Amino acid sequence: MSAAVLARQDAVVCLVVGSAEHGVVEVALAQHRALADGGGRVHLVRLDERPAADALLQAVREAPAGPVLVHVTDKLFGRGPEEAADVLEALAGERRLVVALHDLPQASDGAVNQPRRAAAYLRTARAAEVVVVASRHEERLLRACWDAAGAAVQDADALDVVVVPLPVPELAGGPAEPPTEPSAPLHAVAVLGYLYPGKGHDAVVEALDVLPPGVGLVAWGRPSPGHEDLVDALQEQAGALGRTARVSGWVAVQDLPGLLRSAVVPVAPHAHLSASGSINAWVAAGRRPLVPRSDYAAELLERTPGCVTVYDDLREALARAWADPASTWAPPGSVPGPTVEQTAALVRDVLAALPSRPREQVGA
């Protein structure tokens, strides 16, 4: 859809909530910039802190008339999933919503949190006119929320869901070719992103025994809020196995390309991914990270063949990568994607196709 068509509509209000260091917020801000650069009336409402419903509504009321595009993970909008759903339902009472959902509920959330999060995501989806997710796997997880919450299947069938993949960021220096000596020895195994339960850092430490003595884990990132204890736990685990685990803390944007392109084995070990900004960062750097077999990994390979190395056994995968460092680089000539501009164009089409009147609430 052209910028001219979008320009004839009301303004698009991009509501972005949370710290700029949060992955969902990074995607939302990049998408806003791409939408604004593409033309049309695009207005940003930016709230750094988790808002109460009243504060959020007041900020949006001061924005121009038009639909609201908001990227959502429940932790950004509430102290619990129920509060997050309350805030977003209140917003839907005043503005038409296009909601981009992230971190979809799944079994790995646990027997207590999965149904709570599923009910909250169901409420949020019902409040939106269109729901955007980042993978077909996430679409399946969203529809599973209806089962987890005991809602009617026909409600899920009526939901308007559009898949818009996470963009591959443009790192400084652009996509990298393999180094002059791609078979140069490696010195560590690296995982990028926040530390939180289930991310897989501990699984990597356990698998280091297949590599030469002295090879350790470097974790580029910091613990998610409330999980600061994972740093000590990871280092203690590594020490007990005669290995090391170094946690860098927050990585500045300007330092990221050099780290990602250094002589390490790139691993994204999270077994329950439905979309991954950290994998996209590796890909943007010209690397070919090791990822566990999953529906999401299959989608990545379908979209960009050869962008990741899928494994069933982490030890075997680490040993193969260590023996063949060149395999940790993307095939020559591969083009990572989609770009931020390409994903923004898909969102622009969603916004331009909104009906002139809000649809009825699903299941209402």
Image (cartoon, helix red, strand yellow):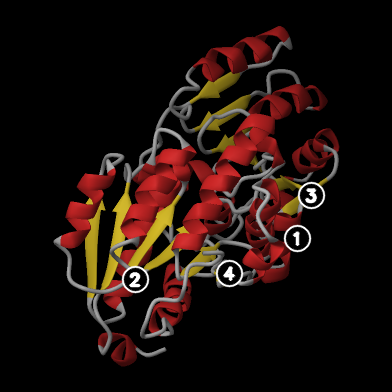
Placement of 208 over or under 160, stated as above or below = above
Label 3 with label 1: CB-CB less than 8 Å: yes
Residue ID for mark 2: 34
- Give the numbered dot on residue 159: 4
Q: Amino acid at mark 2?
A: Ala
Bin the neighbour count of mark 2 within 10 Å (Cα to Cα): few under 14, some 14-19, many 20 and up: some
C-alpha distance separating marks 2 and 1: 28 Å
Residue ID for mark 1: 298
Q: Nearer the viewer, residue 33 or 61?
A: 61
Q: Earlier in the sequence, mark 3 or mark 2?
A: 2
Q: Is residue 244 left or right of residue 310?
A: left
Residue at point 62% right, 26% down? 217
Residue at point 27% right, 73% down? 36
Q: Secondary structure at mark 3?
A: loop
Bin the neighbour count of mark 4 within 10 Å (Cα to Cα): few under 14, some 14-19, many 20 and up: some
From the top left corner, tell me how far across and down residue 98 is, in percent. Answer: 42, 67
Q: Nearer the viewer, residue 336 or 26?
A: 26
Labels 1, 4: front one: 4
C-alpha distance separating marks 1 and 4: 25 Å
